[in-house]
């Protein structure tokens, strides 16, 4: 499926995806109401659908993955608490320090290999005020990112996920999954999203990444958690009115764009293998588990990105010697061939 208004091959992120013609049709016909007043039927349908898919009591439709995580942290913690999460997690690196500014929390960083924390390292990173003479903050929330973006799009083993949830419970912590790409994890591992997230108190799910909706995330958890989250969404300015027009895109994406993630994963693998065969580039193929490829470059990454741009291919340089490529619903086999050819020329 290409359906992209440009001839460029844009591999910067799966967030660049645009609503397809069929998705726009669903949005056009969406029945809407006033979601602040609680009567937008399409929003209600989306929230119920996602909650039920994840085996949780309730859901809340919000504007972005960042907002979903921020509301989850706010609803699970009190000021002075500490959030335990991976060193390169999105919550820590790329959400503007919202955990500190909005929730008054500190962060305990967990070292991990390719973004995947072990239960042992999580447990070691939980600090409690009690027993420390009030020296430590109170670790009360464990956040897990699955798939792990900076880890390379890697997926957790179920046994580790279950054990981390157990560690959280044993240490009187709540547990949250940043599931911006949780459907990629489900497709790659063959497990249902319900099973993956079973032990967790809340999950934030993005509709606007690989699933291709223009906007939106759904936060799921218990009814009492979602009731608190609803209040924080209001206070963060996230109460919205005829949001059903966006929820319709989300419902379409859930019906039509989940299974096809498999294609993105296959294309990422093909591309990764071919780039890894070139002398100036290296890819850790064991980490190419979903739709992301992290490429180590011999030449400066910024120069590689510039050369790719001259071939009408867009990528991000992450560090001075690494770039990231992400496959998504606008990338076809022909595009993959174009990218392989361009890398061969660099
Ligand atoms: C793992 C992860 N979590 C959360 C987000 C935030 O999503 P948004 O850009 O919708 O705020 C992203 C965005 O790319 C992400 O990769």
Image (cartoon, rainbow, N blue to C red):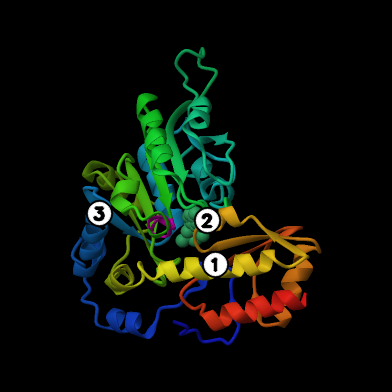
Q: Position of residue 77 (x, y in %)?
A: 40, 35
The relative height of residue 23 versus residue 148 in the rendered view (above or below) is below
Q: Marks 3/2: CA distance?
A: 24 Å
Q: Residue at x 37, y 58 (%)?
A: 238
The reply to whether discs 3 and 2 touch (Cβ–Cβ < 8 Å) is no
The mark lying in front, picked from 3 and 2, is 2
Most foreground residue, 282 or 167: 282
The relative height of residue 28 versus residue 42 in the rendered view (above or below) is below
**Which quadrant of the figure contains the C terminus?**
bottom right
The reply to whether discs 2 and 1 touch (Cβ–Cβ < 8 Å) is yes
Q: Residue at x 60, y 57 (%)?
A: 285
Q: Earlier in the sequence, mark 3 or mark 2?
A: 3
**What is the crowding at mark 3: few (fewer than 14 residues within 10 Å), some, or many (at least 20)?**
many
Label 3 sits on a secondary structure element that is helix
Q: Farthest residue in the right direction? A: 299
Most foreground residue, 71 or 184: 184
Residue under numbered circle 1: 268
Q: Position of residue 316 (x, y in %)?
A: 65, 66
The relative height of residue 114 versus residue 340 in the rendered view (above or below) is above
Residue under numbered circle 3: 51
Q: Residue at x 41, y 42 (%)?
A: 73
Q: Position of residue 259 (x, y in %)?
A: 35, 68
Q: Image check: 85 left or right of 257?
A: right
The mark lying in front, picked from 3 and 1, is 1
Q: Position of residue 129 (x, y in %)?
A: 47, 19
Asked which quadrant contains residue 339, the reply is bottom right
Residue extent of the magenta highlight = 180-186
């Amino acid at each position: 499926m290409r359906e992209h208004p440009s001839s460029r091959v844009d591999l910067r992120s799966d967030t660049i995806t645009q609503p397809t013609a069929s998705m726009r049709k669903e949005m056009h016909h969406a029945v809407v109401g006033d979601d602040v007043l609680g009567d937008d039927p399409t929003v209600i349908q989306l929230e119920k659908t996602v909650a039920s898919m994840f085996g949780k009591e309730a859901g809340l439709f919000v504007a972005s993955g960042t907002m979903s995580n921020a509301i989850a942290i706010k609803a699970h913690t009190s000021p002075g608490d500490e959030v335990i999460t991976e060193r390169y997690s999105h919550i820590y690196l790329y959400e503007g320090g919202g955990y500190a500014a909005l929730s008054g929390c500190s962060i305990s960083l967990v070292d991990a290999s390719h973004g995947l924390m072990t239960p042992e390292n999580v447990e070691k990173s939980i600090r409690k005020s009690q027993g420390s003479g009030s020296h430590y903050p109170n670790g009360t929330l464990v956040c897990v990112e699955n798939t792990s973006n900076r880890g390379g799009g890697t997926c957790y083993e179920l046994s580790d996920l279950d054990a981390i949830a157990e560690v959280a419970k044993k240490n009187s912590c709540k547990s949250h999954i940043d599931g911006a790409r949780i459907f990629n994890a489900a497709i790659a591992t063959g497990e249902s999203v319900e099973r993956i997230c079973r032990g967790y108190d809340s999950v934030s799910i993005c509709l606007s990444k690989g699933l291709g909706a223009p906007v939106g995330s759904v936060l799921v958890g218990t009814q009492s958690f979602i009731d608190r989250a609803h209040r924080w969404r209001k206070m963060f300015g996230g109460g919205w009115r005829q949001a059903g027009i966006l929820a319709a895109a989300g419902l379409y994406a859930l019906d039509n764009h989940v299974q096809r993630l498999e294609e993105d994963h296959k294309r990422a693998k093909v591309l990764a293998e071919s780039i890894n065969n070139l002398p100036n580039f290296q890819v850790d193929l064991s980490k190419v588990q979903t739709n992301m490829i992290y490429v180590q470059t011999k030449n400066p990454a910024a120069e590689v990105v510039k050369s790719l741009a001259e071939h009408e291919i867009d990528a991000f340089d992450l560090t001075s010697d690494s770039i990231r490529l992400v496959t998504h619903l606008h990338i076809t086999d022909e595009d993959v061939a174009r990218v392989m050819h361009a890398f061969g020329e660099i």
